[in-house]
């Protein structure tokens, strides 16, 4: 995923920033912020009232956490994993207070100049199913599934970003997929959202 | 429905990066044929990857984030063990030494004339941030962990600590949050009306009109978007784009406080629209009727529940039905 591609520049900036280089910290934040905001949008939907706050809080947390960053993953993955946790927490808060969230059918997501309109509706519905599922899973499973499906990280990248063993990542993904399977079984109409099997 | 317990995650990774060999492709295809969860994951990955970038807001957010960094050092400057950092760094609002050193200088570098005040200890979940002036006060950042961490992730650097037992918790079949109760604006401040240049060819296609309408709408020019959606629906009534245009226009009009007009568009969506749009259109049709105090609202919510009992709007529908039922 191009958005998350690690660059030597980001790594270098992270090292400099973690040692107190203010200019490097500012540059790093500007470099990583688009990906963080995109992550917040992907997890919450663009119309979610907390999306900017989540991005903003995540950026603050990133700068605060830099001294503990040991380079086990890329700075972009580190930043986006922080955003993922904030976004999932925001989603839970919203579920708790039963506030507005029709982002699952968000209008903005319906459009693109690339695919047909109906394809985009289907894509939006699939995203909505994942977003809804993330709000019901235990946190660590939700985080793992989000990093993998929403941010497109590989198994190894998820393990590095969450600092857990690879087998733990596998276990969490398996459990999350069981929940996804249960969701599909409960609503077979969701199968209509899928493209034909190869 | 039967599906294998083991999912070929490595193959899914390689498929996502386009690195599958012919043999691997065949193995993955065989699995996908019997595993809807993996098919869903694979397609959802592509769906999320296709989301557009959102760069324009970044500078403002970065500036506000930097302004919101803590300004004062904590009384204890000893670095805690890594596990303690993991548990507390972000969630408990611990201000790391470097961040504290960085904050004032960063703010100055960005030309912030005065530092943004932050909450003293005991800290909230996350240090308060400089916020948009029109927004209400935040809840306290990330909520505190609901349970102490005993997960297998003792070295998490930052983040929300997991519940006690992820396996025991299992998938909770919570109802999703409800739909907007009425076609009223969200808590977001209104977007500035931006005049977006909208150009359509002299002989526009359905796709060109659709794109132009989308550009107008996302650019804040809702009047132009409405005009273009209507033109699309009138010129190309049998096109896929027209079906979606009816649905989007219905929501747009609902948001603009014109539920009667929105209702007509939503009903046009329901007349022959694809099933993927039907659930959403039914929900918004019910909302429109609610907004009009139309006695058909109850039946509309009931229809939504009857056709889509697992709908993401189901909870809202049940609440409305209960509210609308006679005492």
Image (cartoon, grey):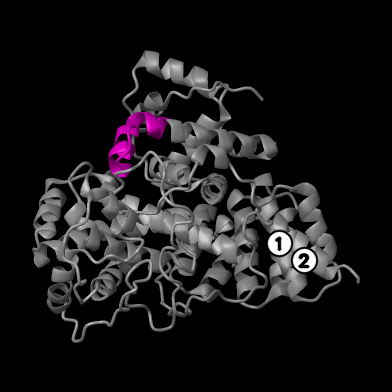
Would residue A155 be found to the left or right of residue B226 on screen?
A: left
- Return the residue nearer the eye: B103 or B261: B103
Label pair 2/1, CB-CB below 8 angstroms: yes
Residue ranking furthest to the right: B327
Main secondary structure along the magenta-highlighted residues: helix
Q: Where is residue A38 in the image (x, y as percent from the top left)?
A: 36, 56
Chain under numbered label 2: B
Q: Where is residue B11 in the image (x, y as percent from the top left)?
A: 39, 24
Quadrant assignment, res A157: top left
Q: Position of residue B232 (x, y in %)?
A: 59, 60
- Is label 1 in a helix, a strand or a loop? helix
Q: Where is residue B202 in the image (x, y as percent from the top left)?
A: 47, 62
> Callout 2 environment at 10 Å: few (<14), some (14 to 19), or many (20+)?
some
Would residue B123 be found to the left or right of residue B70 on screen?
A: right
Q: Mark 2 points at which residue?
A: B320
| Residue at x 41% of width, y 42% of height | B151
- Return the residue nearer the eye: A57 or B161: B161
A164 magenta-colored:
yes
In this orientation, does residue B40 appear?
no
Quarter of the image containing the C terminus of chain B? bottom right
Give, as a single range, the part of the protein colored magenta: A155-170
Q: As displayed, is residue A145 above or below residue B21? A: below
> Callout 1 environment at 10 Å: few (<14), some (14 to 19), or many (20+)?
many
| Total count of labels | 2
């Amino acid at each position: 995923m191009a958005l998350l591609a690690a660059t030597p520049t980001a790594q270098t900036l992270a090292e400099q920033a973690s040692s107190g280089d203010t200019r490097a910290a500012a540059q790093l934040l500007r470099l990583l912020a688009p990906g963080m905001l995109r992550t917040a949008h992907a997890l919450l939907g663009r119309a979610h009232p907390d999306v900017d706050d989540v991005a903003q809080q995540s950026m603050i947390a990133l700068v605060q956490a830099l001294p503990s960053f040991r380079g086990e993953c890329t700075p972009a993955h580190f930043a986006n994993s922080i955003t993922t946790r904030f976004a999932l927490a925001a989603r839970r808060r919203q579920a708790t207070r039963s506030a507005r969230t029709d982002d699952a059918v968000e209008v903005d997501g319906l459009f693109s100049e690339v695919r047909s309109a109906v394809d985009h509706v289907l894509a939006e519905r699939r995203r909505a199913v994942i977003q809804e599922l993330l709000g019901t899973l235990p946190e660590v499973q939700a985080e793992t599934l989000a990093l993998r499906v929403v941010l497109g990280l590989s198994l190894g990248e998820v393990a590095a970003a969450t600092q857990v063993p690879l087998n733990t990542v596998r276990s969490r993904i398996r459990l999350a997929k069981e929940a996804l399977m249960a969701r599909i079984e409960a609503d077979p109409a969701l199968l209509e959202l899928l493209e034909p099997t190869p | 429905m039967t599906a294998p317990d083991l999912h070929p995650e490595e193959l899914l990774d390689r498929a996502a990066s386009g690195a599958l060999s012919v043999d691997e492709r065949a193995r993955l295809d065989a699995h996908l044929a019997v595993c809807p969860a993996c098919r869903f994951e694979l397609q959802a990955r592509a769906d999320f990857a296709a989301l557009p970038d959102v760069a324009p807001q970044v500078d403002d957010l970065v500036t506000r984030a930097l302004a919101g960094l803590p300004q004062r050092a904590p009384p204890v400057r000893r670095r805690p063990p890594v596990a303690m950092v993991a548990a507390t760094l972000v969630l408990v609002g611990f201000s790391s030494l470097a961040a504290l050193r960085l904050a004032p200088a960063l703010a100055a570098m960005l030309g912030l004339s005065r530092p943004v005040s932050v909450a003293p200890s005991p800290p909230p979940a996350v240090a308060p941030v400089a916020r948009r002036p029109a927004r209400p006060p935040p809840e306290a950042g990330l909520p505190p962990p609901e349970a102490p961490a005993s997960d297998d992730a003792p070295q998490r650097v930052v983040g929300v600590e997991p519940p006690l037992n992820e396996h025991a918790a299992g998938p909770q079949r919570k109802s999703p949050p409800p739909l907007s109760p009425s076609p009223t604006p969200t808590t977001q401040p209104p977007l500035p009306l931006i005049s977006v240049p909208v150009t359509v060819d002299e002989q526009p296609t359905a796709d060109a009109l659709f794109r132009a309408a989308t550009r107008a709408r996302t650019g804040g020019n809702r009047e132009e978007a409405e005009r273009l959606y209507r033109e699309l629906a009138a010129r190309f009534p049998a096109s896929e784009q027209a079906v979606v245009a009816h649905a989007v226009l219905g929501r747009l009009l609902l948001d603009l406080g014109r539920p009667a007009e929105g209702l007509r568009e939503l009903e046009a969506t329901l007349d022959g629209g694809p099933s993927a749009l039907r659930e959403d259109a039914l929900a918004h049709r019910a909302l429109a009727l609610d907004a009009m105090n139309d006695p058909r609202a109850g039946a509309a919510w009931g229809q939504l529940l009857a056709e889509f009992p697992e709908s993401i709007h189901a909870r809202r529908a049940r609440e409305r039905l209960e509210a609308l039922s006679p005492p």
